Amino acid sequence: MSFTRAGKFTAKLNRRFGALFAGFLGFLVLMSILSAVGVPDAIIRSMFIGVIVAIYAVIGVMSRTMQVREYFVAGRNVPAAYNGMAAGADWLSSAAFIGMAGAAYLAGYDGLTFVVGLSGGFVLIAVLIAPYLRKSGAYTVSDFLAARYGGNRVRAASMVVLIACSFVLVVAQIQALGLVAGRFLGLDYAIAVAAGVGAIVVCTLPGGMRAVTWIQVAQYLVLLIAFLVPAIWVSMLLTGMPLPHLMQEEARGVAAGRTQDTLNLVLFTLCLMTGTASLPHLLTRYLATTSVREARSSVAWSLLFVAVVVTTAPAYAAFLAWPMPDLAETGLTRIAAPDTTGTPFVITALVATGALVATLAATSGLLFTIASAIGHDGYYAMLDRNAPSGRRLIVARVLLILVACAAAFAALRKPADILSMVTWAFSLAAAGLFPALVLGIWWKRANAWGALVGMIAGFGVCLYYLVATRYGAVEFFDVWGALSSATPDENARFAELKAAWAIAHSEAKDAARAALEDHARTIANWGGVSPLAAAAFGLPAGFAATIVVSLLTKAPAGETRDFVDALRIPRGEPPLDEKAS
Amino acid sequence: MTSTQRARHWRRTTYLMAVTMGLWLFFSLGVHLLAPALDAISLSGLSLGFSMAAQGSIVAFVVMVFWFARRQNAIDEAHDAAED
């Protein structure tokens, strides 16, 4: 894209999104006036929802496209800062806001691992991965891995990891969406889920990644206002100063101190960071930028936009100083927080809107990533390379609907608590993909067998640790007891409970089993590492396997070395670029 | 691009990567290890360990990534590897 055209495009974006931002602020003022004048809460609420839906629908329609490149990577013409905003909106929902104010300060110091963990990953993305991914010309992460390592086995393995992690994450997001919409709009959970997912599909179907991108930018602006305004309000209320970032002392009072030892804090942070750098829906965001250089700065912008919101957490923590019901259950502190007497309804509506918008942003990004993985990597790359672009788009769109339905159904069953699912997704992504991605770019000797075994090993070890310590804790401890961090007392208790279970009859047996399992879960571990940090074992396994197997098998062909060389230089044609279709 | 040019470019790129990763390690994991010690130092009434973990590290990351992007771009241009 020529310089002046890019400049004009950016100017147009500035005008339009500037108008949106100002418009939303104006809307807020209007709502405050209406509320003060006595307009019922129900009407104010509907107007908030109405505005959000309108923004979506308009952008969705404006982004419609019949071009493959626009559908999959937004035409590669998104300016760095705007791309950063889109990524920010997407990211802020991935446990960031759910966990932050809630887990972060309720659990004291440990919750801060969330904050560092979720932001530190961006450094990894910028330095180790994004620029190279962008240069490759790939449309998806699996595309990239298939090109780098050659062959469809690697592509298939990475697709499994990608889809597994993204699906777990999107189900968590939809659950959050259902809870927030349900609570705020007074809707039944199932209806809230259906409505939310339905709205996303309808708005992203015509435009694919192009629609997702611009809707996410709009969502970021709304999010920014939605989180900053209440935070500033609280800050003024409690400290007389409009700077929520300085409310440390108030927040500190709530923090209960450490409950996790340093080892687990460090490992968990590491898992979150490497997970961030491996989650496909975030990585593909940087494929939509105009150039490699822009991809790098886009990561910087993403982090900045995330930081602006995340650092307002102290204000929300201070909210917790007020008496509040059912906080811990849903972890949706940000929704529960303003539900105290004296809080203007507009503030509550704003926070709920922010939460809603964040989950919608993440859900749309994730659904799209899963659908495009199946459509592009599954159908186009593996089944029918000659498919005309029209058919590719139809397949992609049908898949989006199917995946959305599957995810909504899963969310309706509420498989597990949101926070756990989110951390599983991060760990599995890190263990499964990080070694293959990093070694693929930084080590020419890494080959297809290495990557394949590495992905299986990393993902497998991580999955085993996650599942076995939770659902098979007793058996796990039987096998790995020697490596556990259990004290002699805990060991003895295990033996006791086990014996008790052996001799119990009928109902007492079930109770005995439950007691045994509960106790086993507290001691089923390797070296005291919490299952939340499962990637602590998955990552080394993945790296080791990739390195060892690569060295034991044939070195990659000259073409691969050329491919890696091309990746490392920003200048030049992307090796995988499609002719614009 | 000749292979020596490539090698030089990649060497500088790798060096920058190592420096950035070192900084990253410090601000992400190092603070956890140092936090109890930092807690002892007070910065205008706020214990440093807590503040660092909450906000200092993020600010450091933001600055780090912007700085990295500029430095890497400079390296690319110096070695004729940058895009037009």
Image: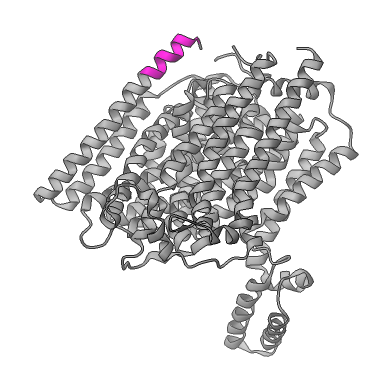
Q: At 69% from the left edge and 70% from the top edge, which residue is drawn?
A: A524
Residue found at x 79% / y 44%:
A453
Q: Is residue A4 magenta?
A: yes
Q: Is any atom of residue A385 visible in this view?
A: no
Whether residue A559 is situated above or below residue A241 in the rendered picture: above
Q: Is residue B10 magenta?
A: no
Above or below A569: residue A488: below
Give the left or right position of residue B39, taking residue A192 as reference: right
Q: Which x, y percent locates residue A529?
A: 68, 63
Left or right: residue B10 compared with residue A238: right
Count of number-bearing discs: 0
A533 displayed left or right of A184 = right
Scheme of image coloration: one colour
The magenta segment is A2-11
Observer-nearest residue: A59 or A203? A59
The residue sitting at 52% across, 33% down in the picture is A300
Q: Which residue is at a point 14% across and 44% down the rendered structure image? A: A33
In the rendering, at what x and y percent does residue A358 appear?
40, 44
Q: Give the left or right position of residue A230, taking residue B77 as reference.
A: left
Residue A176 in sight here: yes
Indicate the position of residue A203 as horizontal and vertical percent values.
38, 33
A252 above or below A176? below
Relative depth, front residue between A88 and A360:
A88
Based on the displayed image, in which of its 4 quarters is residue A152 positioned? top right
Return the residue found at the far left: A37
Q: Is residue B20 above or below residue A565?
A: below
